[in-house]
Image: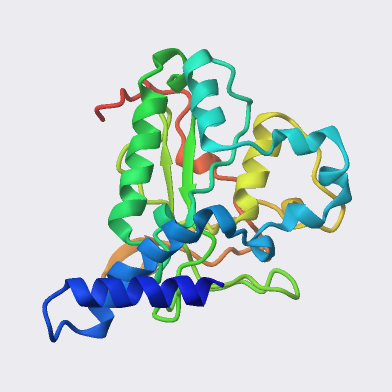
Amino acid sequence: FFPIIYNQVFAAVKAAVPAGTPDAIIQSIAMPKAIASAKPLLYNSLGDPLNASAQVVDTPMHDNLKGLASFFNDVNTNTLPEVSFVIPKNLDSGHPGYSAPARYEAFLADLIAKVQANPALYESTAIVITTDEGGGYFDSGYIQSVDFFGDGTRIPLIVVSPYAKKGYVDHTYYDHSSILKFIERNWQLPTLSNRSRDNLPNPKQDKEFDEHHHVEAEAYIPENAPAIGDLMNLFSFNKVKHNKED
């Protein structure tokens, strides 16, 4: 039914804009409007791996899957779990086709501001911002063959925390499992299994001399590959914390 809704919205937008407006512009306006109209009827089951997991769906763990309103309530009442994952809805995701970078950035700014508005919470919090994919075909960065499935091309990762190294760009090799490794190390938890990526060691990356630029550069390729970092190098826990204005 979504194509029907989209076609109706597209026609309405086309009738409202000046004649001769390129279809690409009309599509960029019509798509988010169509998604918003169909929102109560749409559910992307393919994008939810937990809907097929009996360990989640058929147990009390399913109650941990809550909405953004619940997250902000936990922020305001100091009842936020030790670890929370927030996934924006399609319109705020920054994903091409039905969102835009400005919507995504506004979503992040609002979330960060609300966490920072609770000083007691923020002083012991790290907000890790990343994406599930980033296109990547333009990226020539080194990719490890950590297992049969990859890694894939590089993606952004930003840490917002009083303990984050201010203005620091890290060249340690990370992937999505780095977030899991950080959680396991911080809370002294075991790995998921004896064959999962969180078993891999942290990278050993010594400085090397770049003859072309005549400077020392961080070696991005782990000497002990396959190796995945645990994000700890992004933090400075023994130094003065930054305030939110930093």
Location of the N terminus by quadrant is bottom right
Asked if 137 appears above or below 235 in the picture, the reply is below
Q: Residue at x 36, y 70 (%)?
A: 9
Asked if 158 appears above or below 146 in the picture, the reply is above
| Residue 227 occupies quadrant | bottom right
Q: Which residue is drawn at 38% across and 34% down?
A: 112
Q: Nearer the viewer, residue 211 or 12?
A: 12
What colouring does the structure picture have? rainbow
Can the viewer see residue 150 in this picture?
yes
Horizontal side of residue 24 vs 146, given as left or right: left
Counting the numbered discs, the total is: 0
Q: Which of 146 and 40 is in front in this view?
A: 40
Q: Which residue is drawn at 63% across and 25% down?
A: 81
| Residue 55 occupies quadrant | top right
The spot of residue 187 in percent (x, y) is: 70, 29
Can the viewer see residue 165 in this picture?
no
Horizontal side of residue 101 vs 19, given as left or right: right
Q: Which of 94 and 24 is in front in this view?
A: 24
